[in-house]
Image (tube, grey):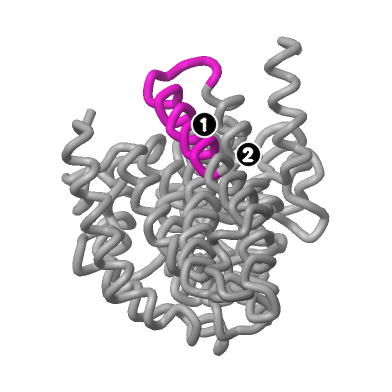
Amino acid sequence: MIDEHTLEEFRQQVRRMAEEKIKPHAAAVDDDARFPTEAVEAFRSMGLNGLPFPESLGGGDGDLLSQVIAVEEIARVCGSSALVMLIPWAALTPLVWFGSDELKREIVPPVAAGEVGASFCLTEPGGGSDLPGLKTRATRVADGWLLKGQKRFISNVGWSAWYAILAKVTEKAYGVFMVHRDDPGFSIGRHERKMGVRGSPMADIFLDDCFVPDSRVVGDPEKGYHYMMETLTYTRPLVSAQALGLAQGALDEAVNYTSTRTQFNSKVSRFQMVRGMVADMTIAVEAARALLYRAVSVAGANDSRSRSFASMAKTFCSDTAMSVTTDAVQLHGGYGYTKDYPVERMMRDAKVSQIWEGTNQIQRLLVAKHAFQD
């Protein structure tokens, strides 16, 4: 476990990098819906692309808390950049945990070096939370598998060279397959025109009898469901951290704006109702951080409550992000509704955190299932 002093130094390093190299480009990345090239270069300069991966594979061997802190600090200034960074971590988690050494050596090092990305492919046109309803199929053939189906809302398409695909191998069993963008039968659909996190490219991917050799199956081809559930318990804290960072960034902007804006011959920050709003925002952000770090601690201890705490953190952090960014827009008055200030972008970016990695309605069901011991 990394000591608290070292983690705080790490936080400050990431924050300085984000302020200097990512924040200046965040508005243009959003306006133009373009890939955050400057951010990826900044990640490379700090070795953040490989932070979670083993040193033997070119990574930084960082624990989950250090990953959460990195995502949080990047999201403070740019939600899109934080997403671009964390998606490859999530995509390669099943491989790192359950894949063969040979497959890990083939795929992980270039992703850890920031040369290419990787994508996590679970959701389909019919939904993402209903695993039994998934229609993508993997059919065994000589020396491998043929994949046929469609995956929806896939982040980092194009930049990603590798795609972790969950597909049915029988009516009740699933496998995880590593597909390369150059594989025959693999193609990318039109890019989505999104409300927020516009710097992370998103599109459908199509698998038309895409051949995957046996060597690119992650672990046991019938244990993919288990692998993905374990992965989601890990990735939900990362998504929570992105939401928390957006909330903290919006709070910072609101405090700065109301401290400098003058109305009725007084700083807006002196108005009692404004102070009450800022107090509530601050309490919510700190409570969200405490719950998220608690979830990280529980996950690190291999506690049976890990999945429930991950769902609690994801729900609370994303709901907090939505409420705090909305209040930050309100505190900016009419200016908050314009693109001249970052809070409107933060509010748009925050919304999706209540939807992806399992909607907050699904997260509440998971928390209740744990509470009732169903």
Q: Is mark 2 on a helix, strand or loop?
A: helix
Amino acid type, callout 2: Phe
- Examine the rendering and report whether any part of residue 180 can be seen: no
Place residue 152 in its image quadrant: bottom right
Residues at badges 1 and 2 in contact (C-beta under 8 Å)?
yes
Residue 363: x %, y % from top left: 70, 35
Quarter of the image that includes the N terminus = top left
Measure the alpha-carbon separation of dots 1 and 2: 8 Å
Q: In which quarter of the image is the C terminus?
A: top right
Principal secondary structure, stretch drawn in magenta:
helix
Three-letter code for the amino acid on which mark 1 is drawn: Leu
Question: Mark 2: few, some, or many residues within 10 Å (few <14, many ≥20)?
Answer: many
**In this view, 5 is above or below 123:** above
Q: Look at 63% across and 53% down and name the residue there.
A: 272
Q: Give the range drawn in magenta.
A: 285-305
Crowding around mark 1 (Cα neighbors within 10 Å: few <14, some 14 to 19, many 20+) is some
Q: Can you give x and y, in whole percent of width and height, for residue 73 in the image?
A: 37, 56
Query: In the image, is 256 to the left or to the right of 61?
Result: right
Question: Residue drawn at (24%, 54%), measured in percent from left and top?
Answer: 12
Q: Does the magenta stretch include residue 233?
A: no
Inspect this view and state whether residue 237 appears: yes
Q: Name the residue under label 2.
A: 316
The circle drawn on residue 291 is 1
Residue sitting at x 45%, y 36%: 219
- Give the residue displayed 25% in from the left and 65% down from the top: 16
Q: Which of marks 1 and 2 is nearer the N terminus?
A: 1
Looking at the picture, how far across and down is residue 337, in whole percent?
Answer: 69, 78
Reply above or below: 30 against 123. Answer: below
